Amino acid sequence: MSPRHRQMATEALHENETLASLKSEAESLKGKLEEERAKLHDVELHQVAERVEALGQFVMKTRRTLKGHGNKVLCMDWCKDKRRIVSSSQDGKVIVWDSFTTNKEHAVTMPCTWVMACAYAPSGCAIACGFKQFSCLSLPSSWDYSGLDNKCSVYPLTFDKNENMAAKKKSVAMHTNYLSACSFTNSDMQILTASGDGTCALWDVESGQLLQSFHGHGADVLCLDLAPSETGNTFVSGGCDKKAMVWDMRSGQCVQAFETHESDINSVRYYPSGDAFASGSDDATCRLYDLRADREVAIYSKESIIFGASSVDFSLSGRLLFAGYNDYTINVWDVLKGSRVSILFGHENRVSTLRVSPDGTAFCSGSWDHTLRVWA
Amino acid sequence: MAAGPAPPPGRPRAQMPHLRKMERVVVSMQDPDQGVKMRSQRLLVTVIPHAVTGSDVVQWLTQKFCVSEEEARHLGAVLVQHGYIYPLRDPRSLVLRPDETPYRFQTPYFWTSTLWPAAELDYAIYLAKKNIRKQGTLVDYEKEYYDRLHTKINHAWDLVLMQAREQLRAAKQRRKGDRLVIACQEQTYWLVNRPPPGAPSVLEQSPGRGSCAASHVHMIEYCRRALGRTRVKSSVCLEAYLSFCSQRGPHDPLVSGCLPSNPWISDNDAYWVMNAPTVVAPTKLRVERWGFSFRELLEDPVGRAHFMDFLGKEFSGENLSFWEACEELRYGAQAQVPTLVDAVYQQFLAPGAARWVNIDSRTMERTLEGLRQPHRYVLDDAQLHIYMLMKKDSYPRFLKSDMYKGLLAEAGIPLETKKRVFPFSRRPRHSGPSPALLPAPVEPTAAGGPGGGDGVA
């Protein structure tokens, strides 16, 4: 072996050793952390909830069906006015509906684009879309990632018939892989995004400037949710690395992390008090994590539920957890008792997105069957 | 066994946990003691062993998982859709009929979780076999595929036909029963991998999810920080959920209903009209909510306005205005930051300012220091101080005040809308004005204009 080769081999060996020692240090610290967390775990949620009155019989039905998308619905969000909805699909279409009347009020079509995330601005005057754009010459026949742009754009909503909605759009965010989620903060002027490139980012809408980035996930980030806290400083994200991470928006640091799921986390949502959040995963379970106790406190699962949960949301009081699954169903869970209250059939393909309305009178589900349904 | 495609090493099963779970179910269904009742099924002149009926499958699932029949039928349908159970009689559609229809369990060789690429060549051979066989006819979409493949792999077509004939010849050596079963198995495999148009493809996955590259350094840093944090006992945290849920239960429309009616159910939007963001007479439930938490009060424009009035009476209205101005800074446009910071300073912090806020000297010092290089979080400390002041001091007094008690007493409970007698007479659904149509709200200045302009209808 030449001296040069010997040197490279030695370096490689060191690197491997370093990697191995880092890994074992991480593992040992994780173990210590679990021990610390376990010390204060003196009771289970369902035990505490034994004295809570059981919920009555649940009758929830589809009250509206929104038809108009030509392909899989990938995302939806409610407007603060409690009745309008924005939804996006795989054929590049973004539609704003008054879901109470089922009228379509606005529509934008972006050819050769998958719109995987969408959000309504707090003012109700704009929407944001996170998408992946492809060259129109090479329409993908499978999930091919040599796309062009992974952007998040903001579209002001206009009723002017002469104005093309796409004309006034603002390109805000740019990631190096697909955008999986986006959300406005407390105003129309900031957007938080999550991406397949493993990071989340906070952007200034007006200038498109990156305000803060959040690194720490070991794989694609699939979802995020802003905390309803008084001081409005944190958000939670979930990813393909099976981790749910809570971030400080100001410093960019991860303040809490949880890793108990056995597969990708598709959806995270805060409990209305802000003290906990729920997650839905490909491992067919939903889990509740308490932020003050710093641990997982409940698992919502059933042997007969085999498919991954794609999206979760709480009812207004936090008593119910609605979860949409990849086997086309929606399961309703009693958050306190841990039992499944109801199963809702109706969609003809997987449920990809689910949100409770701002005043809690209904929830909306979007599906790969091209439709959205409002349930109450 | 029909010479199917040679299995290359499949993708790791861990990526599709639902397939593994389905396999476990199917394996336990075939347990000789605890499994589904097996019987021999007569098809014309052949007898096929180890068949089960659709209704037995549903029955078994109902008992095993303690679920309703509807859910068991759904679960059974999903197993059939994924090709783990196939119909013996009409193998064209992977549907579970909850009756005497016979089914069989798919051989593990063809299990969906093996994730073979289901190559075009193999599909071509399969279709060619079907075409050649005397009774086999290709369905429309199969004909289309066949023609397309013929064009695409024309150069290899001789090979395709040769393979097809060879496989058919080999199959003829088998007993009729085996031949039939193998044909069904193969057909099921292709129905899963090349679904007919209109049928959902169960193999479709979400966009390519990345592999996991563990970030050990981040994890180590995080763990070190986390080890030192204070935690709260589970019992305390969990009790908090109970009290939160019970307090909010009556306010949760999906749990307790809402008055006069849930708009989605009754088609009547009176509930929204009565609970509009800025309404003259808030409902009793709404006024009650202002007492749940300070955040709840501030988030409601009507509540906030009343609180501002109350503070005005106590000559501390500038606190709320200051807080609002800080919110505007935190969530405002990046370009506005220097202007807003300056405006807030002039209005609230400068010595002799018109609406000077009372902050403790240490916080004031820190804030003034930070103002030299203004950024959007520069007022965080001061804002928090004032927020806590209002929360701990003014807010409890507000709740005890005559003003609040008066509002609570005045607030009404809407009457329940009587159920309509004629379910077919639909009330016309009125469309409310879109928030995007309203004139843009006057931007509240740092001087504390109309509270929290969100301009929602």
Image (spheres, rainbow, N blue to C red):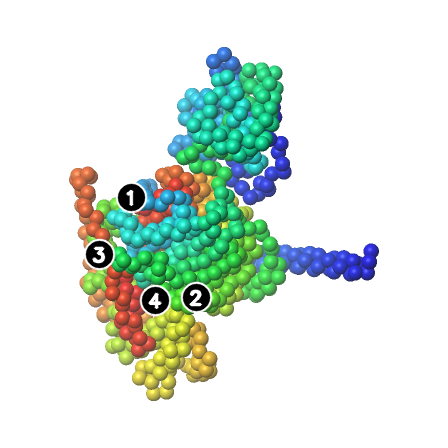
Q: Which residue is mark 2?
A: A208
Label 3 is placed on what type of residue? Answer: Val
Nearer the viewer's eye, disc 2 or disc 4?
Answer: 2
Chain bearing tag 3 is B
For the residues beneath circles 4 and 3, the answer to whether they share a chain is: yes
Residue, x 50% and y 38% (percent of image)? Answer: B203
- In the visual, does A356 lie left or right of A14? left
Q: Quadrant of the N terminus of chain A?
A: bottom right
**At numbered mark 4, what does the secondary structure look like: helix, strand or loop?**
helix
For the residues beneath circles 3 and 1, the answer to whether they share a chain is: no
First in sequence: mark 1 vs mark 2: 1
Q: Which residue is mark 1?
A: A63
Chain bearing tag 1 is A
For the residues labelled 2 and 4, the Cα–Cα distance comes to 34 Å
Q: Which residue is mark 4?
A: B294
At label 3, counting other C-alpha atoms closer than 10 Å, the crowd grade (few under 14, some 14-19, many 20 or more) is: few
For the residues beneath circles 2 and 4, the answer to whether they share a chain is: no
* Figure check: B394 above or below B80: below
* Figure check: B274 above or below B421: below
Chain bearing tag 2 is A
For the residues labelled 2 and 3, the Cα–Cα distance comes to 37 Å
Label 1 is placed on what type of residue? Answer: Arg
For the residues labelled 3 and 1, the Cα–Cα distance comes to 20 Å
Nearer the viewer's eye, disc 2 or disc 3?
Answer: 2
Q: Are marks 3 and 1 in contact (CB under 8 Å)?
A: no
For the residues beneath circles 1 and 2, the answer to whether they share a chain is: yes
* Figure check: B364 above or below B74: below
**At numbered mark 2, what does the secondary structure look like: helix, strand or loop?**
loop
Residue B293 can be seen in this image: no
First in sequence: mark 4 vs mark 3: 3
